[in-house]
Image: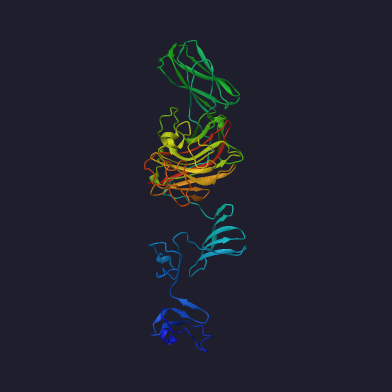
């Protein structure tokens, strides 16, 4: 460091010292070098002014008027349109505004016409965040998450959006029932029943009768039964009559006869619909091991629907986009947008669902997300190793659906061409709790995950390296690049892992994608 010994103030910096007559002069004076060259500082008795100030910037030039740096963020600088104040760090960086408990912290935006046309503020007395435009509040979010907006809320016209709030109950796809003995009873607790009889000779004076046991049937139910197919062509002069009678609580009878013309041996396929005037959901159906339509209902005190498993170990209830309206389970064309619009990863697909856990979540597994469309239509939830492409949340109190790090926690699982990546999100799943589960694919086909609005990081370590998955400390970490053109569809399901029923409330499901 150079020494000032033997130097005079006038030969180093001028205007640093003031005479007695200048002490009370509030006019800013330039601080100059000894040779009279102005510096970037001006002084007065009550103020000081700098052209630029860098705090912690070392030998770097400040990006703007005030640049506060912890550690350089790298080869980046502030945009010239917003560089009056720059806060920089190599990790998290931020600004804290501390206010009184009954006051507010404010950021105002003004111009020559108004000094606070735009405002962002937090009111500590009311405990809410507000945003104002044109000097008036337009947006407020309270401490319990309630959102109030003044004006119209518009969705992006650049995305294709599907939403399901279950104003109509989903039922099982048409349920095939093989009738091995024509004059005996069959049981199917489903709204849509397809009965295939054994091969029978229908004589001119013969009738055959089937008793259908179905707890969806009530004494005043309207039950429709129609002939939809036969194994052999019926002669031109013959007619098969199907009628329903003796409708009572839990059952009805279906009679088959002819118009006094003998009909050779053949099987008859009869479609039965219980209360067809009560519409089923156009886009969604239920399935699962030992599932039936009695187990899907409106919970009453809560929005959405409740799906319930049977009471045997590993029984399931699964909600998924309807496969077919034709009853064959094979023709999947033009069923609904949920089934027939592709939500590939390259379309920046967003998935979101709100579920509410039941009062007991012991001995159960909950799956929510998007599964490989080639396996999602199966009757069962499968262990995650069995699907090539998927992205879903999983909670399971045992490893019945695949090995998990901690069976009390919520996990996220994604797969790329059969390689599985499991992240323990560190969220202990609680009973009687609402979980808003969301994930998004970015333009690089990488997934970001959110639970109740909070982002959680994803692992890039496969289960072949760490069985059961790992935790991720970086909450911004995304998945690896997902496979393009991989068909995945939304699925939500619950499985009981004991000899007792398991329950799950589903409040809504949403998916969206880019137009192109």
Residue 236: percent from the left, percent from the top? 40, 15
Rendered-image quadrant of the N terminus: bottom left
Counting labels gives 0
Q: Nearer the viewer, residue 445 or 334?
A: 445
Quarter assignment of residue 432: top right
What colour scheme has been applied to the protein in the rendered image? rainbow
Q: Horizontal placement of 346 versus 23: left or right?
A: left
Relative to 187, say whether 171 is above or below: below
Residue 105 vs 208, above or below: the answer is below
Residue 127 seen in the figure:
yes
Image side of residue 125 versus residue 291, left or right: right
Q: Nearer the viewer, residue 324 or 482?
A: 482
Percent x, y for residue 386?
43, 35
Is 56 situated left or right of 167 in this image? left
The location of residue 153, given as percent across then percent down, is 50, 52
Is 122 situated left or right of 111 in this image? right
Residue 64 percent across, percent down from the top left: 42, 69
């Amino acid at each position: 460091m150079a020494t000032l010994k033997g130097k005079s103030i006038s030969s180093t910096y001028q205007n640093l010292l003031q005479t007695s007559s200048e002490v009370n002069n509030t006019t800013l004076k330039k601080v100059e070098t000894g040779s009279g060259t102005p510096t970037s500082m001006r002084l007065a008795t009550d103020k000081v002014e700098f052209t630029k100030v860098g705090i912690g910037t070392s030998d770097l030039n400040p990006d703007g008027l005030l640049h506060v740096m912890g550690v350089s963020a790298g080869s980046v600088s502030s945009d010239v349109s917003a560089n009056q104040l720059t806060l920089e760090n190599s990790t998290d960086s931020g600004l804290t505004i501390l206010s009184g408990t009954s006051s507010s912290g404010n950021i105002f935006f003004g111009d020559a016409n108004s000094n606070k046309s735009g405002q962002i503020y937090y009111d500590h007395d009311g405990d809410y965040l507000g945003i104002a435009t044109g000097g008036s509040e337009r947006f407020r979010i309270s401490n319990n998450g309630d959102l109030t907006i003044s004006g119209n809320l518009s969705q992006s016209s650049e995305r294709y959006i599907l939403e399901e709030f279950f104003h109509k109950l989903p039922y099982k796809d048409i349920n095939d029932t093989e009738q091995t003995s024509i004059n005996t009873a069959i049981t199917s607790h489903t709204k849509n029943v397809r009965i295939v009889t054994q091969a029978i000779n229908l004589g001119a004076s013969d009738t055959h009768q089937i008793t259908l046991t179905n707890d969806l049937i009530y004494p005043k139910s309207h039950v429709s039964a129609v002939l939809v197919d036969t194994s052999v062509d019926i002669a031109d002069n013959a007619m098969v009559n199907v009628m329903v009678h003796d409708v009572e609580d839990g059952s009805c009878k279906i009679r088959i006869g002819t118009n006094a013309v003998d009909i050779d041996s053949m099987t008859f396929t009869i479609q039965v619909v219980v209360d067809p005037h009560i519409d089923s959901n156009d886009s969604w159906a239920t399935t699962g091991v030992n599932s039936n339509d009695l187990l899907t209902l409106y919970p009453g005190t809560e929005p959405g629907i409740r799906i319930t498993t049977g009471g045997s170990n590993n029984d399931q209830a699964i909600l998924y986009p309807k496969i077919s309206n034709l009853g064959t389970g094979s023709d999947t064309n033009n069923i609904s947008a949920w089934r027939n619009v592709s939500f590939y990863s390259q379309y920046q697909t967003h998935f979101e669902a709100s579920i509410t856990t039941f009062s007991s979540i012991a001995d159960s597994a909950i799956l929510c997300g998007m599964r490989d469309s080639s396996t999602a239509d199966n009757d069962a939830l499968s262990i995650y190793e069995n699907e090539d492409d998927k992205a879903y949340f999983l909670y399971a109190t045992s490893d019945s659906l695949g090995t998990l790090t901690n069976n009390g926690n919520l996990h996220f699982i994604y797969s790329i061409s059969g390689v599985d990546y499991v992240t323990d999100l560190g969220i202990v799943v609680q009973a009687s709790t609402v979980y808003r589960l969301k994930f998004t694919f970015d333009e690089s086909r990488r997934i970001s995950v959110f639970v109740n609005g909070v982002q959680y990081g994803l692992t890039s370590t496969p289960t072949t390296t760490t069985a059961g998955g790992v935790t991720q400390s970086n909450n911004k970490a995304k998945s690896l690049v997902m496979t393009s053109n991989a068909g995945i569809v939304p699925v939500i399901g619950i499985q009981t892992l004991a000899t007792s029923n398991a329950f799950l409330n589903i409040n809504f499901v949403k998916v969206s994608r880019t137009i192109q």
